Image (spheres, rainbow, N blue to C red):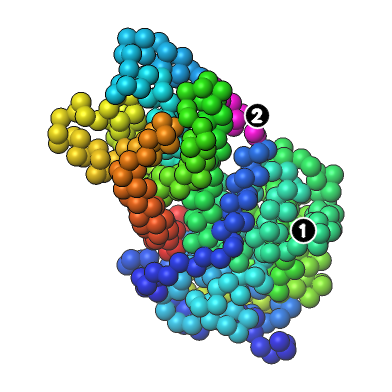
Amino acid sequence: MAQSVYIPRLTRGALKVWRRNWDVFFKTYQVNFLPPFIEPILYLLAIGFGLGMFVGEIDGVPYVEFIAPALVAISIMNSAFFECTYSSFVRMYYQKTFDAMIATPLALDEVIAGELLWGATRSFIYSSVMLAVLIAFGVVDLPLSLFILPFSFLAGLLFAGIAMCFTAITPGIDALNYPSFLFITPMFLFSGTFFPLDVLPGGLQIFARGFLPLTQVVTVTRSLTLSDLSPYFLYSIGWISVLTVLFFFVSIHLMKRRLIV
Amino acid sequence: MDATTPIIDAQDLSKTFGSFVAVNNISFSVFPGEVFGFLGPNGAGKTTTMKMIQCVSPKSGGSLKVFGREAGIYQRSIKKRLGVVPQETNLDTEFTCFENLLVYSRYFGIPKQEATGRIEELLRFVQLEEKRDVLIERLSGGMKRRLVLARALINNPDLLVLDEPTIGLDPQARHLIWEKLKVLQAQGNTIVFTTHYLEEAERLCNRLVIMDEGKILVEGSPADLVSGHVGSDIVEAEHTPEVIACIENMGVSYEVFGDMVQIFTDNPREVAKSLFDTCNPGHVFARRGSLEDVFLKLTGRALKD
């Protein structure tokens, strides 16, 4: 078939798709802004201060400051991932929004690219709100923590791309529960989020460092909020950048295979 | 483009999904200003054909030119000039009527100021100006359909493609859509649509094709198809052996449908008279031949799906 040669057709059209999602988001902003505001407060109180009473310090860092950057990283992951799985699937399958868009000069490549950029934007919006709360609690360093803002877009784009791959191959909306529980939940727990990776068995440590995107994202956010930039920081940025580009194009390709028949 | 260059030109067009042949070597041309219908039972290949014309589904064989350009290659420039009413209403439920059209106008790159004026005009055209700022979920089925029609007109299209424009609507809502399509037709727009409502095809089309199982069975104007395939009139009588014997004697063509015999004729008075004169027909009923008779004759009476 003509589609076997893959050249994405990307123009500024992708921004129009992005803008559509942006407009919908701000139509319902009252419900959209509450979770990123409440969530870190709950976690900081329950885990940071509550559990932190018993943990004390990790590597010389108060426990609440240890988990604060992980909360931002998790929010980057969740907002892009759930946007580009369940929400994108609803737009694609139930609302037929993609069909409406490709009946215009927009190509499917641009529709998917717009969805990915929007997923990344959601990560940016949510982590910004969360960062503001963390700054208010005084548990992150300034000014380096502010670099989380541009970084959240990059990392968000990575999770958006991964999510869109699942959306492209899922048989139905219920099957999206599998990546949520088998991929997102383990990452939430085993990416150096609530305890350092060193305590895990050697094999798991290597797996977490090599294959779990959230590990890399937590490394970056923690380096920034603790003002502690090690060479490993650069490795993480590189790892994230390469995979972001890869998943961006792979997800567009898989979506075309699904929808252009 | 002059009137002799077709807007759509399909030659031996086909589409397969794996081993299933959805569209099987069809050829047709649609000329400027025509209203061209695709009629057929479910699964005839009508929607697949529409999707190929819209450049969203690649063909499997043959050639398909829209505005004189190959549909598989010049998708973007063709789509810029198309207006599409899809079978499923896919409006943005989070937006109002106005916002739906505005967001859609951006996909065509229409500047906001120009779009705003055009949207007010279109909302008036489809009689939704009072619903301008109402969310989609509060609209009736007919209103949603009209809004989709308005959305399809946002870019002043050179070709309007409608897939089952009045599906699932009550008679009042259907008549309102037909009225709007009539206006568009009178303005010289080229319109292609699918339907399985025969009345719709009969009212709107200049020309139509009847499709079944991926093939085009016949093509022509509604009147020509009726006179060519069933004759101008139909006389119906009760199906009894006596009546059949009578008809056989008269030497006219007929078909039996359940407890009814249909006689296709251009001369209903005489047929009815000789039925009454020579046999005991019970109820006899004469009426004009319709597209429905052509359709049922060609596609058979068996349930399609």
Q: Residues within 10 Å of mark 1 (few under 14, many from 20)?
A: few
Q: Residue at x 51, y 45 (%)?
A: A150
Where residue A33 sits, quadrant-wise, is top right
Work out whether A161 lies above or below B47. Answer: above
Disc number placed over residue B124 in the picture, else none: none
**Left or right of residue B226, residue A233 in this image:** left
Q: What kind of secondary structure does the magenta stretch mostly adopt? A: helix
**Left or right of residue B56, residue A2 in this image:** left
Q: Nearer the viewer, residue A229 or B214?
A: A229
Q: Position of residue A80 (x, y in %)?
A: 46, 41
Chain of the residue under the numbered disc 2 shown in the image: A
Q: Are marks 1 and 2 in contact (CB under 8 Å)?
A: no
Q: Position of residue A151 (x, y in %)?
A: 47, 44
* Residues marked 1 and 2, same chain: no
Q: Nearer the viewer, residue A2 or A142?
A: A142
Chain of the residue under the numbered disc 1 shown in the image: B
Residue kind at label 2, given as amino acid type: Gln
Q: Position of residue B102 (x, y in %)?
A: 73, 54
Q: Residues within 10 Å of mark 2 (few under 14, many from 20)?
A: few
State the residue position of label 1. Answer: B112
Quadrant of the rendering where the N terminus of chain A is positioned: bottom left
Quadrant of the rendering where the C terminus of chain A is positioned: bottom left
Q: Nearer the viewer, residue B3 or B301?
A: B3
Disc number placed over residue A30 in the picture, else none: 2
